[in-house]
Image (cartoon, coloured by chain):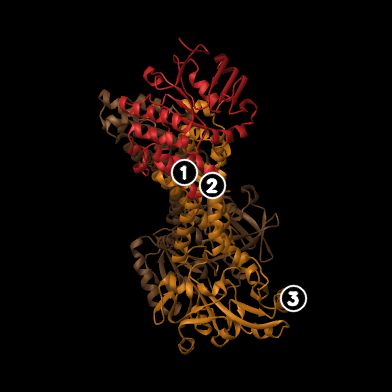
Amino acid sequence: MNAAINLLKLAWIQLTRHRVRSLLTIFGVASGMFLFTAVETLQRSLGKATEASAADTTLVVYRENRFCPSASRLPEHYADEIRRIAGVREVIPVQIVVNNCGASLDVITFRGVPDELLRKFAPEIEIIEGSEGEWKRRDDGALLGEVFAKRRGLKPGDRFDAAGVTVTVSGILRSPFAQDNNVAYVKLPFLQQASRAGLGVVTQFNVRVTESKQLEPVATAIDELFRSGQEPTDTRPEKAFFAETASELVELIGFTRWLGIGAVIAVGGLVANALLLVVRGRVKEHAVLRTLGFPGRAIGWLVLSEGGMLGLAGGVVGVGMAAGFLRWQNFTMGNEGQTLAIQPDATVIVIGVLAALALGIFASLWPAYQAMTQPIVKNLRS
Amino acid sequence: MLPLSYAVRNLFRSKSRLLQTIGGSAMVVLLVMASVAINNGMKRVLSASGSDRNVILVGAGSEESIQRSEVPERTAGIAEAAVAGITENLGVRAVSSEIHYMNYISLPNGNRSQALLRGVTLQALRVHPEVRLTAGNFPGAGELMVGRLAWRKLGLAESDLKPGGTLTLENQSLKISGIFAAPGTVLESEIWATLGDLRVLAKRETISCVVLRLDDPADFAEADLFAKQRLDLELTALRESDYYSRLSSFFKPLRAMTWITAGLIAAGALFGGVNTLYAAFASRVREMATLQSIGFGRGALLASLIQESTLACLTGALLASVIAVAFLDGRTVPFSIGAFTLEVGPGVAITGIVTGLLLGLLGALPPAIRCLKPPLPTALRMS
Amino acid sequence: MSEPMIQCRGVSKSYHKGNIVVTPLEALDLDVAKGEFLALMGPSGSGKTTLLNLLSGIDSPTSGSLVIAGIELSKLSRRALTKWRANHVGYIFQLYHLVPVLTAFENVELPLLLSPISKKERHARVETALSLVGLSDRMHHTPAELSGGQEQRVAIARAVVADPPLLVADEPTGDLDRESAVRILDLIRQLARDYGKTIVMVTHDAKAAAAADRTLHLEKGQLLENP
């Protein structure tokens, strides 16, 4: 055990004293891990938005067979009828206006809600700047989600306009529901008029049920209720709704999986290359160590340690930079009125660093084997 | 100066390293070429899709997305009479009322796919002269005309969409009456139905936009004035070319992602390459010193080392070009509002070659300098 | 007179070079006493280094018996041989073979990294070895900062730090100037006389051989007292 630790220290010394070579490999690994972390973050953010969990209690009622918010028109009075269904805790009508339905990074989403209902519907929302009272007072007031405000550099009192709607920022909110943080909440009547949908018409209803196992029965009940009506509905859990509606986004992010795999292969190749160079250059040195009594596996351990350390160092740099960059930039992707915040979490960081370490070790296996099986006598002579 | 053959022969000293360099640079150049092709392709299809002779009258506030726009039906008639400069042919003015609609369509194989639908009248052909029927007829009631690249957007095989086939929209079966081509534009990925049908299927009382074709692009001012004066119609006038260039900048972040990915991979490959060359040149210090003592100057030796590296990287670039032409050229890539074709043209090729050159130069320069730096007496004694 | 330190009986070594079979050593017999300083001389290719490699356990004889300090080397497994090497032999090379990025101290420390002794004790032994060769003031210099003679002394320190009973030296003064060579030979002789180490040295140089207790000549795979 002692020997193993001593050898680790020796490998570290070799690494730090061949500065240029080590730095080149570390930066190369960092580039690959940056890409890997970005892709992993995308995948995880998407997963969180689309995979059902036991804490889910929100349904989205949408016009059947419609996908762009401007195409879904439901009568506002549906809310009262939905509220009467057993298992429903609260219903909120929402009018959605986006500046563009296509998938991209710079999508602006407005959500028009009745101001007295927002608190009832989502008591978990907290106002971190400005005031809700201010919002209620103004017709054109807007409560901005935290991520949205940061992305656009807006604070209470600012005016901004997009998608044909001009609003004044009344406050900034923070919500445990990811999508709330990426949108601007405005008053329902205001948005209905500004978007020319007309009063009495909304895009969707968000329904909170009493507990997650009520999701399915309530959804079925709602669709049954309006099946033969003027505007039939399609009710799904919020996450399933996201997955189906933002399909373009889902496809785009699915494609990036290949990039992630490519990055991993590239990193592995880099480390393997670097260590093969090391092993080839240290042939005599290793032979001398063998004469000193170092067994073959000690030499192998030295090579593996060096590879693992290079991978780890590169991983820390690459993953750290990617996570920092993503955190700082607050990217939000949008598609068909759905928003996705691209935020790295602790799991992504840990996975990235461990993956880099594992890659470093794995990539060193062949060079280590090469080093271990080099014949002593021949190499002393060279 | 050292002869080129010296550099060539040195390259073959280590076949595995040569292959590694060629492979690595081929990969990087291919990625760069793909990024340029994607960038150009997307820009090209969007700029071709919009003519500067066409003016789109959209609902105010919907300038970024016609799908959201709502324009009163009567607008077409009013604009036709009020706007000067509209192209006229045999007494008929080129004014087209259109509904732009995106929704799921049921396919013959049972799947559903998102489709871009445009509800039009025959007037559309006057306003979009690039549209040509290649098979069948313009749609009548209950019929659809399918763009030549629509199969790509729908995820079908090209042979699945033929005149006579059916597609289902809102539980209505619609027959494919014909296929149209509009080369190089996003229109080719669309499915056209009659304005009347789409009005019913999309349950709209308004249309999406009115498109006017002008004789002289400068007459846009007339259309603009019209839109500003008729406040009751709540319109904005947009040049069609401007609309599409706005869309182009909307997709910029996604294009940037392609570049960043290519950049990261290039950086990784470059780091690996420099590392390899440091090791390779380190074992040649004595050789370089010997040549210097014979009388070759450091500059000549530096040039030779860089020649070696650049030759290998350019070979990789050549390999990448061959792969690009074989596998990328002519490929259609779908994106949200259409599809574009990748073109491996001179611009892409030149970028590839320059990338190869830069890789060779940047990759070899630091190691070569280090190799030539030690003073002669020390260098001659190195192993 | 106690048992000889080294006892070779009928030791032969042959290996393949492409299609040819080369036999540098043929049925060799050799006895070396404990604490003896033996010099081996002979023309290039006579098998001197091969014999040294056999004695130091980095190679195995094709046939014959090789007993060092009572242990039959040819019976040891590769693993056991490696372990034996760590504790029983110190090798001194012509070109020193120090690790360039490590300081003198760290180079001498290398053989001890595999043993379970504590860091404190390890450092103590390294310092002892370095003061023995007279380089205490240069402990933290890298080989690039040392002269040829100093490098060889570090190599010797490395060879003795684990206190092995046997030292083998392959042309230890081959790359040194006259003055440094003399100092190295004095040091080696001191190791034999004052510390009882058994030393087998291969050399081209008759003056170097003169420093030894006995000189043998190796010619065509056979050992001779006088050429």
Residue C207 as seen in the image, left or right of residue B24: left
Count of number-bearing discs: 3
Residue linked to disc 3: A217
**Number of the label disc, if any, that sits on residue C125:** 1
Local secondary structure at mark 1: helix
Decide which of A282, B183 is in the foreground and name it: A282
Q: Residue at x 34, y 31 (%)?
A: C148
- Which quadrant holds residue C209? top left
User: Height in image: A18 above or below B125?
Assistant: above
Residue A366, x across and y down, in percent: 56, 38
Q: Amino acid at mark 3?
A: Pro
Picture colour for chain B: brown
Q: Can I make out residue B32 in this image?
A: no
**Number of the label disc, if any, that sits on residue A373:** none
Q: Amino acid at mark 1?
A: Arg
Picture colour for chain C: red
Picture colour for chain A: orange
CA gap, disc 2 and disc 1: 10 Å
